[in-house]
Amino acid sequence: MPDTIKPGTILIKDGTLLPETVRFESEPCVPGWRLVKDLDGCGLDRKIREVGWTFFCLAGQLGATVFGIALVASVTH
């Protein structure tokens, strides 16, 4: 398992259907997900487009709720 997930890391859900010709090196990362080791986003996109498929990222929205006494303190912390 990798030490960290950082910007640009590609995770692919276990069982994701891909064309047989799209091959890459990966390793288990977190339960149900594999970390792509030998390609960045551009490289994976290129391999997928070569077989006529389209690569896209579907990311969820991130949000947080913060409570603070002073407006300035709650915004800066």
Image (tube, rainbow, N blue to C red):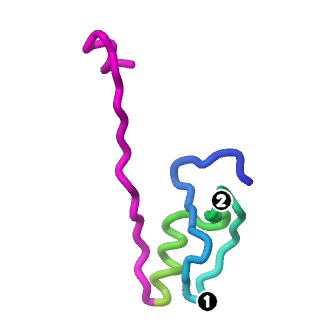
Q: Main secondary structure of the magenta part?
A: loop
> Magenta stretch: residue 27 in it?
no
Q: Secondary structure under badge 2?
A: loop
Label ID, residue 47: none
Say above or below: 10 vs 19.
above
Residue 25 versus residue 76: which sits nearer the camera?
A: 76
Q: Which residue is mark 2?
A: 31
In the picture, which quadrant includes the C terminus?
Answer: top left
Amino acid on which disc 1 is placed: Glu
In percent of the image, x 56 and y 63: which residue is there? 40
In the rendered image, residue 47, in percent from the top left (x then y), is placed at: 53, 80
Q: Position of residue 54 (x, y in %)?
A: 40, 80
The residue carrying mark 1 is 20
Observer-nearest residue: 5 or 70? 70
Per the image, label 1 sits on a secondary structure element best described as loop
Magenta stretch encompasses residue 74: yes
| Label 2, residues with CA under 10 Å away: few <14, some 14-19, many ≥20 | few
Q: Quadrant of the N terminus?
A: bottom right
Q: Amino acid at mark 2?
A: Pro
Q: Provide residue 6's location: percent of width, then percent of height.
A: 57, 47
For mark 1, does the 10 Å Cα neighbourhood hold few (<14), some (14 to 19), or many (20 or more) residues?
few
9 vs 64, left or right, is: right
Look at the image and give the residue range highlighted in magenta: 52-77
Asked which quadrant contains residue 12, the reply is bottom right
Image height of 63 relative to 37, above or below: above
Q: Residue at the spot x=57%, y=62% of the render? A: 11
